[in-house]
Image (spheres, helix red, strand yellow):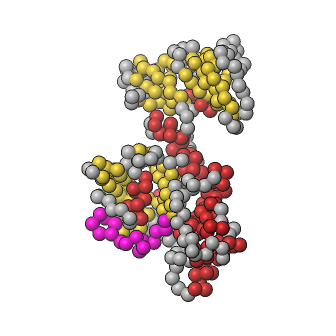
Amino acid sequence: MVFIGLGIEADLKAQAPLLEVRNLVRRFSGRPVVDDLSLRVMPGQVTCLLGPSGCGKSTTLRIIAGVDRQDEGMVLVSGNVISDGSSDTPPEDRSIGLMFQDFALFPHLTVAENVAFGLTGPKDAKRSRASELLARVDLSRAIDVYPHELSGGEQQRVALVRALAPRPKIMLMDEPFSGLDERLKDEIRDTTLSVLKDEGTAVLLVTHEPDEAMRMADEIALMRAGRIVQLGAPYNIYNSPVDKACAAFFSDINVIEGTVQGALVSTAFGEFLAPGHPDGGRIDIVIRPQHLRIDFDRGGKGPNPTAADGAPARGIVERARFVGRESLIEFRMDYDGSILKATVPSVFLPSPGTALWLMIRRERCFVFRNSD
């Protein structure tokens, strides 16, 4: 099977990275918060460090920025070592831009003065650079106003162009959109991504939101307990998770448990192949709710299912809710009393107690060793 993201990854590997982190370790009170972390970010590439709070994302960013120091490993910019734990290039000399949740605009300076704050040279040249960047984020009209006169989304755009004004090779972004109204996030993220791509900046973005990572990233580094557990293009990392926890991080999942006998696992939906798993081993078969299909026609009486579909299984509706663009239905399965969730586009709200038949496509299932 060929994945869309593979071509992107191959192209990136052929380039030299602007940012490279090798075997980074950071300990607090003897406990590794960042644990042997390595990654590379190419020119014009957006890499997302994605993971739950406390997994080491922001600590990694602070080490790269130079505001914290690693215990082991090194940080390189354009192939040059800027930090190896014993010697460090000062933050202001790293050619790295920073953008955080707190926009930290100077209230007593105009927008133009905020954008030009980190620039050197003649006053006219600094204002020209500020004007150029503000035009690219549709804020030319605000060049001489003060930050308190702007909306949150406008302040975010000013913070972005201020960070870009010195033309940094690398941009570090720590949850920069978390303070924005939900309806503005998509617009601001798209604007930010467009400007960063045009500048050819290598971007390392920290977020705990999978949707944000999927929307913005060329590559996602999924972190857990200080380590990168999976690295790849969004399409690949979503469709080929390395374990149950990785699959669950991107969406709700259903887990069908079973025991291996002769490389097969028996379920309500028929038998599943489990090659490489020993007899007697416990297995989790994972499927997302959108891939659990309600079979309105068969009801156990229609044509035989295909091998890809497996067998139909009956479930009793426990609850049904409309959640915006789709409906979420929870079923209690006749087979073993387990609860499975299915999503259906638009409005479909069967009454509790309704019996319906369910199907799953085996190609949409992931088979993992049970780790509980």
Residue for point 47% across, 39% down: 246
Residue at figure coordinates x 34%, y 66% from the top left: 83
**Residue farthest to the top, as pictured:** 301
Q: Residue at x 67, y 16 (%)?
A: 354
Q: Is residue 252 or residue 277 the one in the foreground?
A: 252
Q: Quadrant of residue 269?
A: top right
Residue 316 is left or right of residue 95, and the answer is right
Task: Please provide the residue range marked out in magenta.
Answer: 83-98
In the picture shown, does residue 147 fall above or below 39?
Answer: below
Residue at (58% x, 81% y) in the render: 126
Viewer-nearest residue: 9 or 205: 205
Residue 238 shows in this picture = yes
Q: Nearer the viewer, residue 107 or 278?
A: 107
Q: Is residue 304 above or below residue 291?
A: above
Q: Position of residue 44 (x, y in %)?
A: 54, 63
Residue 37 horizontal/vertical position (percent): 37, 53
Q: Is residue 326 above or below residue 63?
A: above
Q: Is residue 97 magenta?
A: yes
